[in-house]
Image (cartoon, rainbow, N blue to C red):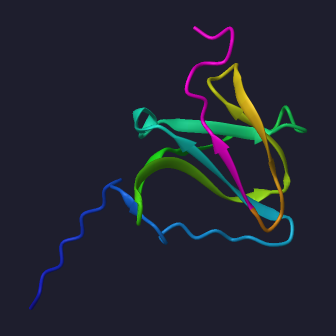
Amino acid sequence: MHEHHHDHRYGPTESGTVLLDLGGDTGALIIYTGRDLHGREIEISRADQPTAKRTHVAVRERIVRDGVFHSAVYPDLPAGLYTVWWDDDTPAGAISVTGGAIAEFVWPSSAPPGVG
């Protein structure tokens, strides 16, 4: 008899464990951040649908061949223009997601004007 103990934690994610379903009108977005945002949830929303619900995912540490980086991955997004939110009221920027492709957004290193 063997006992199996499974330990589920939000540890580092190794490359290849995030599956992206790309194609047609579905794309993906990766937001690259610094280590200081590890665990923080970043919200995005459709720029053309201001009343639509925001989507959020947590920033995770990801281990790749060249080292470690931190990012938030949004795997199944309908193509369109998205707002990335710095906080509840302030956009950090906008990013266009196209079907069949991965859009990349780099988190600003300092707050947008007027924050703080």
At x 86%, y 71%, the residue is 24
In the rendered view of the protein, which quadrant contains the C terminus?
top right
Q: Is residue 28 left or right of residue 72?
A: right
Farthest-out residue, bottom? 1
**Which x, y percent locates residue 95?**
77, 42
Above or below — where is 101 with respect to 91?
below
At x 52%, y 48%, the residue is 71
**Which x, y percent locates residue 108?**
61, 29
At x 55%, y 48%, the residue is 72
**Which x, y percent locates residue 40?**
47, 36
- Mark count: 0
At x 41%, y 39%, the residue is 38
**Which x, y percent locates residue 56?**
61, 42
Asked if residue 59 shows in the view, the reply is yes
Q: Is residue 49 magenta?
A: no
Numbered range of the magenta stretch: 102-116
Farthest-out residue, left? 1
Asked if residue 61 shows in the view, the reply is no
Q: Is residue 113 left or right of residue 1?
A: right
Q: Is residue 70 left or right of residue 42?
A: left
In the rendered view of the protein, which quadrant contains the N terminus?
bottom left
Farthest-out residue, front? 66
Above or below — where is 59 with respect to 112?
below
* Res 12 quadrant in image: bottom left
Q: Is residue 105 magenta?
A: yes
